[in-house]
Each structure stands twice: as C-alpha cells, then as structure tokens.
Image: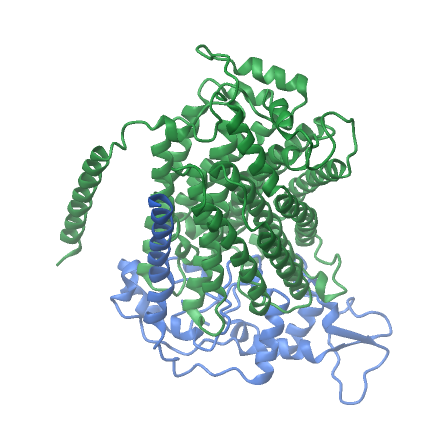
Chain colours: A blue, B green
C-alpha cells in the first residue's frame, strides 16, 4: 500500500502548497483592501453593459491593467493611465484584467474617448474611424430602419458608412455597453503602494509614487 | 537584516537541504538504477519485440528488423502475462472507445472554430451578423472544445486504457466511468452552447458557467472512483511512472476545477491570481503529466526497450508536482498583484527546467542510437515529435516568465504561439500517437489506410510549425511596437497582419490533418478498408491478436 499512499498524499501536499501560495495568501492580502475614495460603484445600466462586454468576449483583445511607468512607460504615455492597484478592482466581479492587447487597454477609455457618438459608431463599424482596425464590427447590436421611431436616437456615422436611405438605431444593449465604456475612468489619485508590497518593483517605487497622479 | 545576508542564509540552508537529500537518496539506493521497475511495461520475455499496432505486417517486420540489437535472445513472451494484458484491454475497451470517439468529434469541431477565429482576425467584417459568430465567442468556443473536449477526453481515454494494462488488473466499475464520461461531455456540450449564447463566467479557461461546471466535476468524480478502486486492487506491487503521472493528474484537474469554479468566493485582483493559477495548471497539472506519462509508456513500448532510468523519471514527477503548481503568477507580470507572488512564480518557472531536463535526458538516453526507428513507425514519430516539443515549449516557457521577456511578450500573440506549441506541438501530437497505438487493440481492427497516418503527421507537424514560427515572430514585433510610445498603437496592429495570415495557413493545415485523422478513425470504426486481422470488437481469440500485433 505504500506506493499509492505516497502518491496520493504527495500529490495533495504539493497541490495544497500551491493553493496556499497562489489562491489563499492573495485572498488574505487583498480581502480588506478598501476601494479608493474616487472609485464609483457601477450603476445598473453600466453593469448590464459590463455583462455584454463579457458575453461578447471584449476582454480577449482588450486588457484593463496599465503597467507601471518604470516597467512599461509607453502605457502611460499612450494615455492609458497610471498603473492600476488592487483597490481599483474592488467592484469587479468577475475581474477583466485581460491577457491580450490586440486592441488598446481600456482601463481609462472613459477618459480617453468620452464621446458616446464615437463609441456607438465605432462599435457599429470600427473601420469608419480607424481604417486599419481589425476589431470586429457589431451590426447585431444595432437596427437598420427606414426612419427612427419617436424618441429613438440614430447614429451619426462618418459619410460613406450609412446605408443609403436607412438610419442606424442602437439597441438598448449597445447603449448600455457604451455607458459601461464611458464609466471606465480611473483618473482619481491613489496612495502609493505599501513599500513592503512593492518588493517586486524594488528600484522603481520612488519614481512610481511621483507618477501616481492621473495621466490623462 | 539586509537582503544580501538573507539571500546568503537562504543559499546556505538550501545547500544543506540539498546535501541531506543527496545522503538520503544514497541510503535509499536511489542512485543505483532500477531496471526491474523500468521494465514493468513489458511481459516477461517481451523486451526486444517491437510493438506498433498501427503498422501493417510488412512494415512491422521492417521495424522489428531495424530494432534488433546485439544480445537479444529469441524469447517468447510469457503467456500468462499476455493473458492478463488481453483481459485488461478487454475490460477497458468500451469506455476507451467512448472517450476517443468524443475526443475526435471535439477535435474536428474545435479545430474548425479555431481556424474561423484566426481568419476573423484578418477579415474583421466576415461573419459578424449574429452574436454567436463574433470573434470573442468563436475563440472561446474553440478553446473550450479543444481543451476540455479534445484533450481532456483523449487523456481520459488514455488513462483508462493504460491503467488496467499497467496494473495487470481488469478495470473495475467501468459503468461508473462511462457515466462520468457522459456527464463530462454533457458539460462540455452545454458549456459551448452557453458560450455561444453569451452566457459565460468570463474567466479565461474557466468560461463554462459554474452551474454547468457541476456536471463536469461530478463526471470527474465518477471517473476517479473506479480508477482508485482498480489501483488499490491491483496485482502488481510497484507502480510504473505512468501510473504516478496519471493518477495524480486526475486528482489535480478535479481539485483545480472545483477550487477555480467555487462561486462567490473569488473577486478582483485575487480572482485574477486564481484565474492564472488555474489557467497554467490545466496545462501543468493535467495536460502535461498525462501526456508525459503516455510518452513514458508508448515510446519504450514501441521500440521494445525500457527507459534508461526509472529513478530519474520519478525525480521528474516530484519536481513537476512541486514546481509546476506554482508558476501561474507569471501571467500577471507588470500587473496589479502583489510583487512576491509574481517573483515566486518566476522562480518556480525557472525551476521547471529540472523536471523537463530529467524527462528529456531520460528519453534521449533511451532513444540513443535508435532514432532511425522513427522512419519505420509513424506512431513513434508522433510521440517523439511531442516529446521534443515538450522540451522546447517548456524551456521557452521558463524564459518567457522572466520580467525582461514578459515586458515585450506579454499581451501579444507571442503568448498565443507559445500556448499552441505546448497544447498542440507537444500534447496533441502525443495524443495522436497514443490513439494510433490504442485503437487497433480497442476495436480489434487495424487502421484501414496506414499511409494516411504519415499524411496526418506531416500536415499536423508542418502546420503547427508554421503557426508557431510566424506567430512568435509577429508577436515579438507587436510587443516591441507596443512598448515604443513614439509609434501609434495601431502600428502594433498593422504589422501583425501578415503573421496573422500565416497563422491561418498553419491552422488550415492543422484542420486538414484533423479531417484526415477523423476520417480515418471513422473508416476504422465503420470497418472500411481491407480485412486484415479480425472482425469483432471482442474477438474469439484475443491473445492470438495480441501476439500478431506484437511480432
């Protein structure tokens, strides 16, 4: 019996060590992080938009985590904002940090591009605004009509992208999604991280602290 | 205490520990080679008799002739051992067929979804009219279908087939295993439907909604039960290294999935840390150990020589178990998670070089002077290709974890290329080889058109190499452009276009290879092709078959 006991027990011990290090310890460390004062809760419309962001897989091409100026200075220079801190994500369930930047980081897209018209039009046809974009168009978030019903808004697309004789009306889902994008504003200041926590970024903490003001 | 003193103390303690480990291993005789344990996969008298069920008899004779070495005596394999093996194979045949059948279906489906997603990246206005067609969903359907549908099903099939063989015990509770397999596949199918409909948990690798995940976890538990029961009721005393990897892998993936899916527990940055701990461990603690375990069985079995060092293989197992479980944090380099977590993961990523070298040295010594055998056996070619890609992808992964490399490679297609080198170049190629070996024994029918196996090999291997080389190159350029604030972001998009197109070419070859493979599989199941050995699933003279294949 020695073998299978050794095997099972050993496999469980190594597994438990990993769970403690990568799941439990971070949980204990960030459990009590308070939300920064400037961070607003999402409204219900924004949460619906967030659900649509998730359902359509936006996070597979857009990250929401600008890196620090010492590690990747271009992030801040592009106007993506200061490096994010754990407190910024207190209301994020599930997290949307993302792992790809096929498109730009969206942590501060509400600061960088607050225009509702632009966001709606860009969702309808990204190439109307950025000719070389490879972002998919989302025609299913819009309706093509002969004329808008009373109370409905229509899209102001750049010339050449409006189908002849038609108007483009955003669905409620598209409007919520844009509300969510507009709410992505993390331009409030945060305290520099506890120097002990920043051990991974040793030399950069002084430089960092100075940079922790809104970048855009 | 300053850090210099601390690291000196750490180094001192570590070297003392290493010294004690060395003394302990001397006392336990671990430095003396254990040939008996390494030969556990053979029947008595079987060493020297090549075994590749996917070959026609003429090709098998060629392989046998090429494999003869000085000192081979003309033994006949022990009849009793062979009877046990046949009984073990018969006990597992039906569940194994079920898993491999599902795996093939998901491979075809997932590959086509992947190719569609790849094409969409350079044809952004193609197939956009419906929500389920959008890139974000098709890409995730691809991931779920190939990771859970293809690799998981195929690995379960391999575990269920090898376990009774290696334990020389008929499989117990196969009805439970089939029920578990049904639950797992119900979960995969509904998970894919849910993702297409926009219902997802939104975490990479964990998209399947947790309500559906319950079925997956329940299915895995139904499979673990009989496997463990067979394990404790086995007839052999010591366990071969493959059994170590496979048993541990089954337990790990189930626990990983349960911890990762726990609803309402994870949040914010902690959830991101958990997410990547899970994401990397699916590869590290499930795909890799099962595929490595499979290589440890199939490679020596085909060439009919035991692995060079059994103890080295066990060292590889324990170091993999310890180090691999902690590497996930390197996906968050530069992110808002605690610095110690990332540093820990980077260190363990580098430590992964130990199990990878232990495996590679072992395999290189086993194959030394015998690599020419790959010319005679496409099955062996698949397994060797996979083993070599394991070395490459793991070494690449270790160095990719470093901060300086992550700075460029993170958030780019470089990472995607790396993931495909691991999941396809290594794991999937080994699975192909294993299936070619297993199915004739499972179905008691030979592969009808052996030439298709070679065609499959060349399409798949050339496809994955094109995919990997171009996407790695393009991803690196993309990362450099992204780091240079003087260049507008859109340049980092524009410059990847030719590489994305090449990726679709590679992906197209891979999908073509799947068509060949699954078509061949169907032809075998439907009993097409020349009638060469024996018809029924459970032949009247199974042992005669086993010997026929073994000669």
Q: Is residue A206 left or right of residue B72?
A: left
Residue A61 visible in rendering: no
In the image, residue A179 above or below residue B361: below
| Residue at horizontal 84 percent and vertical 74 percent from the top | A166
| Residue at horizontal 70 percent and vertical 27 percent from the top | B450
Position of residue B25 measured from the top left corner of the image (x, y, whole percent) = 24, 36
Q: Quadrant of residue A171?
A: bottom right
Q: Quadrant of residue B333?
A: bottom left
In the image, residue B531 above or below residue B277: above
B367 or B220: nearer the viewer: B220
A40 or A103: nearer the viewer: A40
Residue B88 visible in rendering: yes
| Residue at horizontal 61 percent and vertical 38 percent from the top | B90
| Residue at horizontal 74 percent and vertical 30 percent from the top | B448
Q: Quadrant of the C terminus of chain B?
A: top right
Position of residue A195 measured from the top left corner of the image (x, y, whole percent) = 25, 67
Q: Quadrant of residue B234?
A: top left
Position of residue B9 measured from the top left corner of the image (x, y, whole percent) = 14, 50
Q: Quadrant of the N terminus of chain B?
A: bottom left
Q: Is residue B276 left or right of residue B469?
A: left
In the image, residue B275 above or below residue B90: below
Total count of labels: 0
Q: Is residue A146 left or right of residue A23?
A: right
Q: Is residue B35 left or right of residue B204?
A: left
Residue projecting furthest to the bottom = A150
Position of residue A127 measured from the top left corner of the image (x, y, whole percent) = 69, 62
């Amino acid at each position: 019996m020695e073998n299978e006991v050794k095997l099972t027990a050993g496999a469980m011990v190594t597994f438990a060590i990993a769970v403690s290090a990568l799941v439990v310890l971070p949980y204990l460390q960030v459990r009590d992080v308070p939300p920064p004062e400037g961070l607003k809760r999402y409204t219900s419309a924004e949460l619906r938009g967030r659900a649509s962001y998730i359902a359509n897989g936006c996070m597979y091409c857009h990250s929401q985590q600008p890196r620090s100026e010492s590690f990747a200075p271009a992030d801040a220079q592009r106007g993506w904002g200061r490096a994010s801190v754990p407190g910024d994500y207190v209301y994020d369930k599930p997290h949307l940090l993302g792992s790809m930047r096929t498109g730009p980081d969206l942590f501060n897209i509400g600061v960088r591009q607050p225009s509702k018209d632009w966001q709606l039009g860009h969702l309808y046809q990204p190439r109307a605004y950025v000719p070389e974009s490879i972002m998919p168009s989302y025609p299913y978030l819009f309706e093509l009509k002969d004329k808008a019903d009373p109370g409905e808004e229509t899209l102001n697309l750049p010339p050449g992208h409006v189908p002849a004789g038609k108007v483009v009306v955003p669905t409620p889902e598209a409007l919520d999604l844009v509300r969510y994008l507009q709410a992505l504003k993390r331009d409030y200041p945060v305290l520099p991280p506890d120097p002990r926590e920043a051990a991974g970024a040793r030399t950069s903490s002084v430089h960092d602290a100075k940079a922790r003001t809104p970048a855009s | 205490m300053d850090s210099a003193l601390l690291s000196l103390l750490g180094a001192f303690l570590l070297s003392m520990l290493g010294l004690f480990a060395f003394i302990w291993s001397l006392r336990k005789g671990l430095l003396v080679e254990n040939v008996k344990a390494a030969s556990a996969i053979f029947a008595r008298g079987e060493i020297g008799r090549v075994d590749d069920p996917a070959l026609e008899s003429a090709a098998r004779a060629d392989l046998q002739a090429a494999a003869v070495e000085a000192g081979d005596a003309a033994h006949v394999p022990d009849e009793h051992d062979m009877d046990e093996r046949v009984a073990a194979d018969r006990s597992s045949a039906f569940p194994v067929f079920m898993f491999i059948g599902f795996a093939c279906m998901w491979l075809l489906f997932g590959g086509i979804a992947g190719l569609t997603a790849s094409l969409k990246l350079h044809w952004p206005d193609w197939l956009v009219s419906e929500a389920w067609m959008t890139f974000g969903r098709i890409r995730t359907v691809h991931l779920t279908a190939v990771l859970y549908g293809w690799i998981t099903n195929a690995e379960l099939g391999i575990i269920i087939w090898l376990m009774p063989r290696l334990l020389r015990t008929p499989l117990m509770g196969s009805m439970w295993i089939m029920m578990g397999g049904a639950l797992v596949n119900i979960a995969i199918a509904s998970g894919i439907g849910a993702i297409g409909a926009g219902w997802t948990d939104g975490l990479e690798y964990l998209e399947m909604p947790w309500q559906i995940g319950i079925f997956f976890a329940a299915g895995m538990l139904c499979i673990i039960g009989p496997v463990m029961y067979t394990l404790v009721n086995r007839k052999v005393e010591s366990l071969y290294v493959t059994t170590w990897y496979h048993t541990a892998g089954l337990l790990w993936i189930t626990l990983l999935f349960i911890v990762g899916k726990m609803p309402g527990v994870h949040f914010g940055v902690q959830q991101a840390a958990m997410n990547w701990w899970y994401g990397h461990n699916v590869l590290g603690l499930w795909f890799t150990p099962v595929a490595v375990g499979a290589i440890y069985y199939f490679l020596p079995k085909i060439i009919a020589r035991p692995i060079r060092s059994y103890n080295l293989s066990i060292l590889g197992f324990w170091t993999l178990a310890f180090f691999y479980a902690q590497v996930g944090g390197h996906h968050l380099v530069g992110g808002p998670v605690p610095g110690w977590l990332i540093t820990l993961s980077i260190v363990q990523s580098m430590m992964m070089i130990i199990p990878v070298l232990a495996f590679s040295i072992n395999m290189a010594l086993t194959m030394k002077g015998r690599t020419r055998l790959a010319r005679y056996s496409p099955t062996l070619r698949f397994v060797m290709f996979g083993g070599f890609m394991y070395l490459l992808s793991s070494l690449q992964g270790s160095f990719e974890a470093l901060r300086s490399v992550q700075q460029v490679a993170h958030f780019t297609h470089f990472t995607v290329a790396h993931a495909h080198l691991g999941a396809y170049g290594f794991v999937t190629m080994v699975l192909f080889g294993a299936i070619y070996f297993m199915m004739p024994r499972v179905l008691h029918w030979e592969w009808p058109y052996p030439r298709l196996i070679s065609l499959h090999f060349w399409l798949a291997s050339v496809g994955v190499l094109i995919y990997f080389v171009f996407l790695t190159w393009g991803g690196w350029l993309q990362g450099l452009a992204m780091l240079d604030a003087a260049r507008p972001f859109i340049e980092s998009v524009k410059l990847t276009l030719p590489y994305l197109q090449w990726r679709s070419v590679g992906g197209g070859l891979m999908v073509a290879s799947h068509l060949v493979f699954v078509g061949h599989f169907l032809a075998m199941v439907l009993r097409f092709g020349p009638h060469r050995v024996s018809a029924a699933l459970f032949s009247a003279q199974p042992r005669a078959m086993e010997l026929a294949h073994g000669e």
